[in-house]
Amino acid sequence: MKTRTIMLVAGEPSGDALGGQLIEGLKTLAPSGLRIVGVGGQRMRAAGLQSLFSIDDTSVMGLREVVPKLPRILLRMRQAANFAVKQQPDIVVLIDSPDFTHNVAKRIRKLAPDLKLVDYVAPQVWASRPKRAAQMAAYFDHVLCLLPFEVPFFANAGLAATFVGHPVIERAPAPGVGAAFRARHRISADEKVLVLLPGSRLSEIRFLWPVFRAAVERTQAATGPLRVVIPTVPTVAARVRQLAAEWGSSVLLTEDQQDKFGAFEAADVALAASGTVATELALAATPMVIGYRVGQVTAAIARRYIKVPYITLVNLILKREAIPEFVQEECTAENLSAELIKLLTNPSARIAQVTASAEAIKALGHGDEKPSVRAARAVLKLLDEPRKKTAPKGAS
């Protein structure tokens, strides 16, 4: 049997997690005859990928953080694209982080126009810059969508798409992992646990850590002692460890992915940065408060384009604020702590949020076939199909 080559490219931890799951899905459906190459992080390497370079260089967000690293980021874009041109894989799957992966795709399309390019996790163009969907049709052949309403959106822009489900639903913690986490770390059953998740990028840590710490301290002053658990990722672990040591509070820091879900289930409440982790918390039925801040320039630009009323996926799906979220100027210690205190002291508020989260998670495909397997099947199907060289909608 001919060995076929699949190239995967991820640029930050969230994409690395998706890429790791996709590799496992590909192994399940095609245990032999595949060669997987490209760019990824710890999760993709653990699944068997030999990465071209570390994603530490590309996992940045915000103008202030990107500008100093721009020469290195551009170098990494060129390296990834040139690798694709040299290797001539049967298909290239670019995962999440559109600021990085889409530029890689554009360069590949220019240098090797016959290569088949797939976008896994489309940017939320329905939330901002809808015209970008038609632009994507110029350099992508197909999009693997996490949300069902994205498929007709891209189809109307002239770009074929497949709904594969949201990979986060595969990360549901096994029953009992919360109790095991408490036992392993000698946390008693009556001790209140707060999971703190200040982000997976250094820029997020810089903006969110001070306000998150202040919010936790205000909450403790009102509710009594809390055991603070901070699951983190390798890209920011050293900085988080330093900040936690400076805090001097009773903080437990963990970098283990399985430990993370044990912490989620063990927690009474969570304070988290906006992102995939909010959906993971919903999957674990953990009541939460979401906060997010970026630099003022980045925020001013974002406000010109973002058209959706919420930043948390659960709220977007339900079309209401089931999970309290505070962005930019509203992301204050006072606002965050007020909601944390409510969740810790009001059983009705906890039940209402957990019930709403379960409804949203079901809409993402919970209970159906694993999204990573569906995504892998879509990739393998595209692998066997000839590339359709159709012009994007509106092209001359």
Image: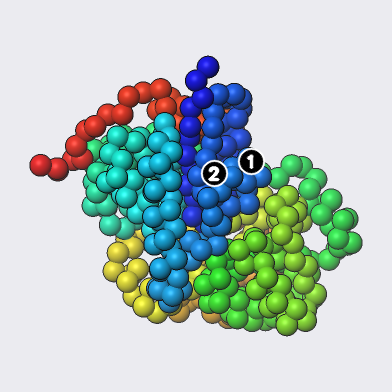
Q: Residue at x 75, y 78 (%)?
A: 245
Please tell me how crowded label 1 is: few (under 14), some (14-19), or many (20+) other residues with Cα within 10 Å. some
In this orientation, which residue lies closer to the viewer: 196 or 52?
52
Residue 366 drawn at (x, y percent): 57, 37
Q: Residue at x 74, y 42 (%)?
A: 174
Mark 2 or mark 1: name the one nearer the start of the chain: 2
Which mark, by number, is residue 47?
Answer: 1
The amino acid beneath tag 1 is Ala
Q: Secondary structure at mark 2?
A: helix
- Is residue 260 toward the left or the right of residue 305 in the image? right
Q: Quadrant of residue 49?
A: top right
Which mark, by number, is residue 212?
Answer: none
Residue 9 drawn at (x, y percent): 47, 47
Q: Residue at x 54, y 28 (%)?
A: 34
- Residue 321 appears in the figure: no
Please tell me how crowded label 2 is: few (under 14), some (14-19), or many (20+) other residues with Cα within 10 Å. many
Which residue, given by chain and number where applicable, does mark 2 sit on? 19
The amino acid beneath tag 2 is Gly
| Cα distance between the residues tagged 2 and 1 | 9 Å
Residue 211 drawn at (x, y percent): 58, 79
Is there CB contact under 8 Å for labels 2 and 1?
yes
Furthest-front residue in view? 86
Vertical position of residue 183 compared to residue 362: above or below: below
Residue 90 drawn at (x, y percent): 42, 31
**Quarter containing the C terminus:** top left
In this orientation, which residue lies closer to the viewer: 342 or 192?
192
- Residue 129 appears in the figure: yes
How many marks on residues? 2
Q: Residue at x 43, y 53 (%)?
A: 79
Q: Quadrant of residue 338?
A: bottom right
Q: Quadrant of residue 233?
A: bottom right
